[in-house]
Every structure is written in structure tokens, then in C-alpha cells.
Image (cartoon, helix red, strand yellow):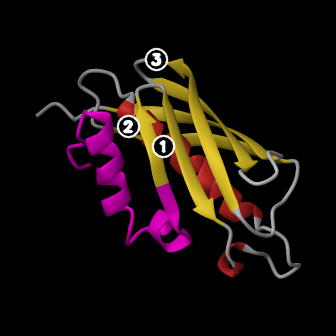
Amino acid sequence: MPDFPKEPAALASFFQKHGEDCLPGLLGIDVVEIKKGSCRLMMKVEQKHFASNGYLHAASVIALADSSCGYGCVASLPEGASGFTTLELKSNHLATAQSGIITAEASMAHGGRTTQVWDSVVTSADSGKTIALFRCTQLILYPANK
């Protein structure tokens, strides 16, 4: 795991830059804000985000929500932690969007030394409709004793 910056603006820039060649970059996910306990991301809905049925693919929505929780988790790691890995995730899809911007607002529901639980609400910026409700559990990782 890389050393993550601690300052929120530097952390947001770090994830924006380092995500360019990873899934968030491929999907066009943009970092709006990251701070301890929360994260906000956005994504412009494009053809690449759709399933073959013409609707927003659930995996695109999950990638946005999961990224918001993961980035928030890094900003909220306990002292001495080196990173995290996802143990479990769940999403409820309530609506779709076929254009415009969708946002993911993540917030930490539980912040322990061994696990964190995060919620993310994905919303259409244009209509204000809730697209999905997402929850995940993160296992906090620590360096091995040498």
C-alpha cells in the first residue's frame, strides 16, 4: 500500500491522479471531496456505463459507491493502519439515470480499529432521485511485525 497523504485536499488529488489508470479513471469518476468520515465523488453518465438493456449498469453504480467508501476509509484509517480490504458489500438499486451526473456521498457508520462500516447514497444530480443505497464493511490492515 502506498503512503497516503493526510490532508484532505492532497488526498483528493492523490486519488484523482492515482485512479486515472484504474477502474475509477476508466469509468470517469471524479473526486469532489474527501475528509475523515466522509467522501463525495461524481461521474458523468456515458454510454460506457450502460447495460445492454439501455439502463445504467449496476456495476457502474457499485463502482462509484464502493470507490466513495474506499477513499473515505483511507482518510479515516486508525493510527498505525496501512490500508484496508473490503469484507462485504450490498447495494439496493432504486432508480436509474440515462444522462447527466450521478454523485456518491459516503459516510462512516462505524469506525473501529479492525473494521469500518460505510454507507453511500448514489443520487442523480439533475433530478435529485436516489439511484442506490450502498453499504460495505472494510477490514483494517496493519503492517506485519518484522
Q: Say whether marks 3 and 2 touch (CB < 8 Å).
A: no
- Depth check: give the residue in front, 104 or 127: 127
Answer with mark 3 or mark 2, whichever residue precedes in sequence.
2
Answer with mark 3 or mark 1, whichever residue precedes in sequence.
1
Depth check, mark 3 against mark 2: the one in front is 2
The C terminus appears in which quarter of the rendering?
A: top left
Look at the image and give the residue range highlighted in magenta: 1-30
Local secondary structure at mark 1: helix
- Is 33 above or below relative to 55? above
Q: Residues within 10 Å of mark 1 (few under 14, many from 20)?
A: many
- Is 36 above or below relative to 50? above
Q: Is 25 contained in the magenta span?
A: yes
Q: CA distance from mark 3 to mark 1?
A: 15 Å
The residue at 43%/23% (across/down) is 114
Q: Dot 2 corresponds to which residue?
A: 74
The amino acid sitting under disc 3 is Gly
The amino acid sitting under disc 1 is Gly
Q: Residues within 10 Å of mark 2 (few under 14, many from 20)?
A: many
- Depth check: give the residue in front, 16 or 140: 16
Which mark is drawn over residue 70?
1
Q: Dot 3 corresponds to which residue?
A: 112
Q: Is 27 contained in the magenta span?
A: yes
Local secondary structure at mark 2: helix
- Is 26 above or below relative to 42? below
Local secondary structure at mark 3: loop
The amino acid sitting under disc 2 is Val
